[in-house]
Amino acid sequence: MAKAIPKIGSRKKVRIGLRRNARFSLRKSARRITKGVIHVQASFNNTIITVTDPQGRVVFWSSAGTCGFKSSRKASPYAGQRTAVDAIRTVGLQRAEVMVKGAGSGRDAALRAIAKSGVRLSCIRDVTPMPHNGCRPPKKRRLEPCCRYSRPLFLRAFFPHYYG
């Protein structure tokens, strides 16, 4: 019988919700780092915050959905703030760079929460993708009237420039 391969990293069960029959989810315990990069992705529907080490390896991530917000409340500034606080507390950062992407409503609130949390920020960069004239737009729609000669003939006779 073959030996089982041991799993790397400690996994502990984290309880989601306050009810008795709440779901359990497996989540790795986050590594503790002192210096890193905080990526804030703020869309119109959600705010996702990823904490990486200086080499770019993901240490911890958090989103408004994992913080307990549902549907349209995920897009609120308060959800962005709570998400940022959750991500920073778990990792224990001291110095960080911040990279912000997107134009959602949680963007500014997340930045304010990061600044107030006591993390020393070396730089704040906006990495929102901007098109340099982008893709070609679709061709203009041509709508033809149902019946070309639907106007009465006498109106055409009196107003040829209007009903030409």
Image (cartoon, grey):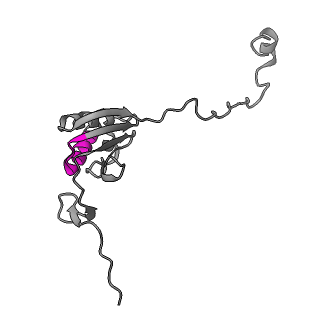
Q: Quadrant of the N terminus?
A: bottom left
From the image, give the main secondary structure of the stretch colored magenta. helix
Q: Is residue 145 left or right of residue 43?
A: right
Give the quarter of the image for residue 126.
Answer: top left
Residue 99: x percent and y percent?
Answer: 35, 38
| 70 vs 150, nearest the viewer | 70
Residue 19: x percent and y percent?
Answer: 18, 60
Q: Is residue 61 above or below residue 164?
A: below
| 101 vs 145, nearest the viewer | 101
Q: Is residue 164 above or below residue 15?
A: above
Give the quarter of the image for residue 88.
Answer: top left
Assess whether residue 70 is covered by the magenta stretch: no
Give, as a single range, the part of the protein colored magenta. 79-95
Q: Is residue 34 left or right of residue 135?
A: left
Q: Residue placed at 76% from the left, 16% from the top?
A: 163
Residue 162: x percent and y percent?
Answer: 74, 12
| 156 vs 63, nearest the viewer | 63
Q: Residue placed at 17% from the left, 37% from the top?
A: 118
Q: Quadrant of the C terminus?
A: top right
Q: Residue placed at 23% from the left, 66% from the top?
A: 10
Q: Residue placed at 28% from the left, 37% from the top?
A: 110
Residue at the farthest bottom position = 1
How many labels, in total? 0
Q: Is residue 57 above or below residue 12?
A: above
Residue at the farthest top position = 158
Residue at the farthest front position = 55
Assess whether residue 92 is covered by the magenta stretch: yes
